Amino acid sequence: MTSNESLVAGAGNFPPTHWSVVVAARSSDSGERTRALDVLFAAYWKPIYKYIRLKFSKPPEEAQDLTQGFFVELLERDLLSRFEPVKSRLRTYIRLCADSFVLNEIKHAGRQKRGGDAVHLALDFSAAEGELHAQCIDPASIPSNEKFEEFFEKEWIRSLFAAALRKFREFSPPAGKMSALALFEAYDLAEDDPPSYARLAETHDLSVSDVTNQLAWARREFRRLAKEELRSMCSTDEEFARESRILFGGNA
Amino acid sequence: MDFLSDKAIARLREAEAPPDFSATRYTLREFLARGGMGSVYRAQDQTLDRRVAIKILDAADPDGALAEGLHKEARVLAQLEHPGIVPVHDSGTLPDGRVFYVMKFVEGAHLDRFLAGVFSLPERLRLFLRICDTVSFAHSRGILHRDLKPANIMVGAFGEVLVMDWGLAKILAPAYVRSFAAPVVTAPSLPSLKESTTPGTVATQDGIALGTPGFMSPEQAAGGSASVDQRSDIFSLGKLLEVMAKPAAHRNATRIPKALESICNKAAAVEHKDRYEKVSQLAEDVSRFLDGASVSAHRENLWERALRFYQRYQAAILLIVMYLLMRTLFAIYSRR
């Protein structure tokens, strides 16, 4: 992209696919149901694991069993079919289901040790544990339920953005945007304060305008992919519009 | 890098989705700033081959209130033709529903940044007088700014002083309302032009605080839009004068002269009635202070009056004293 090119190419704000995990989870087609649950696990297992670790102060092994157990229960008891979008948001419903499941497990401790004949999902718990350590979260610093809700909300956003980022990385090289991806990683994904555009321009041997334009492209594409992920978690356009506003504020 | 830090997430949530201007004569070049409801970009006007700045809503506004606010802001600016107010060139709506207007691109620094390099008090006060001139002009056209603060003042590359961001402006004079009213939208009342502007601005609807803490008048903070008049802007000017008289970067400088402090206090008086009635009166006092004359806001004691007299006519007094001293010495020498 040269500095003479426009900053934007005119992508729409709404993702084109309107496939919904909530609708698919109720489908009579078993393949469709499995796909819905795959998407749901991918988006929620890390937030659920971290939430259980912190809120219930569970050690890693026990939190792993509880996370596995929760998703098995979600599947076996078909909990998603009871979700009513008009009453709450999907992630609130899932968090409350997780609360109820863990409390029940604590109450009937030893009823059946998870990990025996239970189904095991291939989840990278060591990565989740590493993230928790990287965040250096002290459970005592989030004492109230509201704070745990906020924490879960934040982790859900982190998980959603991570999924969008994975897709963005797959999407960028074929689209001939390696430089935009590198800039995006250096600036938008910087762990702390990002370098200036001028510094980026110098490092990547580009003009500042090119940096601006390529970052604009990358952000637009990332946002499009994040919205696609989000859309798949919403059952209606209204819910999606609402969630999109929460996620991106005035920029939605 | 799979783990996204909290800062990265905040950045991704904030990141702009740039608007699509491909159907217009403008090409976006660079994101400049973001306020509560809109963003400003540097762009190129392809027809006239010149740089412009474009202010645009962050999202389409189906309710129409924000869009109408931005349209009104553009119309207010278009009516206020003054060297201290950035001229508007164009306005419109993108196919995605986002309203925008195009204005002159101003290259320069915000006042607070500019002041860091200006050490002379008279120079800073002369700058303040130019701000007063612009605000006074707007008042004469029946328009209140309502968000005067350093971040909304730009000093251009050639020393031009521009009062920016008229998004919270309030139209007082009914005579001008007709010219601002949109052709298709009826406006039974004309409250604030928009709900939010630069970061730090407290944004609101009628009846709630509107302005920026630290610079907004008590009546604005109380949300009493009916009692907001030109003296509310005078309050903000008083606060601005305090900042300009002793900018944060010059904290080690000598304290503000008492007369100037009294001017600040009178302009930023808590009680509406205790302030200057017009910006021109405030400007007059500042000018008199610059000239070393007495100011209406400060009652001097004898010592202060003598000191001011001395400072104003310092050169002449020193000449006379030297002359008298020499005459005395000459007389003593002659007697010997």
Image: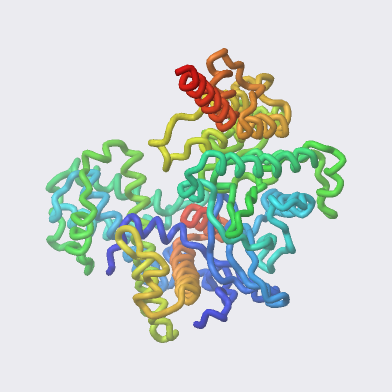
Q: How far from the left and from the top, in percent, is residue A195? A: 35, 65
Q: Quadrant of the N terminus of chain B?
A: bottom left
- Coloration mode: rainbow
In which quadrant is the C terminus of chain B drawn? top left
User: Picture coordinates of residue A152 (x, y %)?
Assistant: 33, 50
Looking at the image, is A215 positioned above or below residue B117?
Answer: below
Q: Is residue A87 visible?
A: no
Which residue is pictured at 57% across the width and 13% down the height?
A: B302
Q: Is residue A215 above or below residue B77?
A: below
Name the one closer to the observer, B147 or B202.
B147
Q: Is residue B54 left or right of residue B1?
A: right
Residue B331 at x, y percent in the picture: 51, 20
Instruction: Please provide percent x and percent y for residue A201.
Output: 40, 74
Whether residue A71 is visible to the viewer of this picture, yes or no, is yes
Residue at 52% from the left image edge and 39% from the top image edge: B121
In-front residue for pair A32/B197? B197
Q: Quadrant of residue B28?
A: bottom right
Q: Nearer the viewer, residue B18 or B331?
A: B331
Which residue is located at x 68 percent, y 26 percent? B276
- The residue closer to the viewer here, B316 or A97, is B316
In the shown orientation, is residue A32 left or right of residue B61?
Answer: left
| Residue that appears at 66% across and 55% down | B61
Position of residue A105 relative to residue A41, above or below, is above
